[in-house]
């Protein structure tokens, strides 16, 4: 009777242990499945996050490049405006110099004209005087 009792007890214990093992195995399998799913989910989320951050970085870089391009365009516009202004000033200065030179030349010409007229008058007077002188001399002789 003792042996049977011991055997029965052992069988019960083995059954309980098997049941515990089965439960443990099932839990393990379930958790493995859910772990795998979670890992896959994490990987997907991580990839998506990386893609998003890469996209954001690209967008930011795009914005940065756009700003750089814009600043280059602005700098070029400023340079063109500056060159245009300088060129216009140079043209204006040259025009003024030509005008001034023309005016100076005209003044010089009128000055020379007056001088020549004056010289001419002096010459005529001298000729008249010498003619008078000559006739005077002739009369005396």
Image (tube, grey):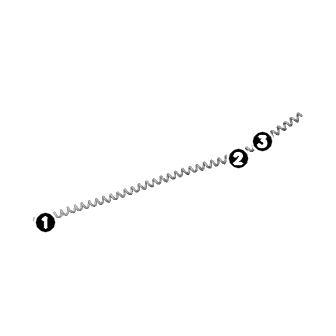
Q: Is residue 139 above or below residue 51?
A: below
State if disc 3 and disc 2 touch (CB < 8 Å).
no
Residue furthest left as drawn? 140
Is 105 situated left or right of 25 in this image? left
Between the C-alphas of marks 3 and 1, the distance is: 163 Å
User: Label 3: few (<14), some or many (≥20) within 10 Å?
Assistant: few
Label whose residue precedes the other's in the sequence (3 or 1): 3
Q: Residue at x 77, y 42 (%)?
A: 23
State if disc 1 and disc 3 touch (CB < 8 Å).
no
Q: Which residue is mark 3?
A: 23
**Quadrant hosting residue 6:** top right
- Tell which of 4 and 95 is nearer to you: 4
Total numbered circles = 3
* Relative image position of residue 79 (x, y in whole percent): 45, 53
Between the C-alphas of marks 2 and 3, the distance is: 21 Å
User: Label 2: few (<14), some or many (≥20) within 10 Å?
Assistant: few
**Quadrant hosting residue 118:** bottom left
Label whose residue precedes the other's in the sequence (1 or 2): 2
- Tell which of 138 and 50 is nearer to you: 50
Is 12 situated left or right of 132 in this image? right
Q: Which residue is mark 1?
A: 135
* Relative image position of residue 93 (x, y in whole percent): 37, 56
Q: Which residue is mark 2?
A: 37
């Amino acid at each position: 009777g003792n042996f049977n009792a011991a055997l029965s007890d052992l069988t019960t214990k083995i059954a309980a242990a098997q049941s515990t093992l089965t439960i443990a195995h099932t839990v393990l399998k379930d958790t493995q499945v859910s772990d795998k799913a979670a890992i896959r989910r994490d990987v997907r989320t991580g990839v998506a996050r990386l893609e998003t951050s890469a996209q954001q970085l690209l967008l930011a870089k795009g914005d940065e490049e756009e700003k750089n391009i814009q600043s280059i365009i602005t700098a070029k516009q400023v340079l063109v405006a500056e060159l245009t202004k300088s060129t216009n000033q140079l043209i204006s200065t040259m025009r003024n110099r030509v005008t001034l030179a023309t005016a100076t030349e005209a003044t010089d010409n009128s000055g020379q004209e007056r001088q020549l007229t004056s010289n001419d008058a002096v010459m005529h007077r001298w000729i008249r005087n010498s003619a008078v002188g000559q006739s005077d001399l002739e009369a005396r002789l």
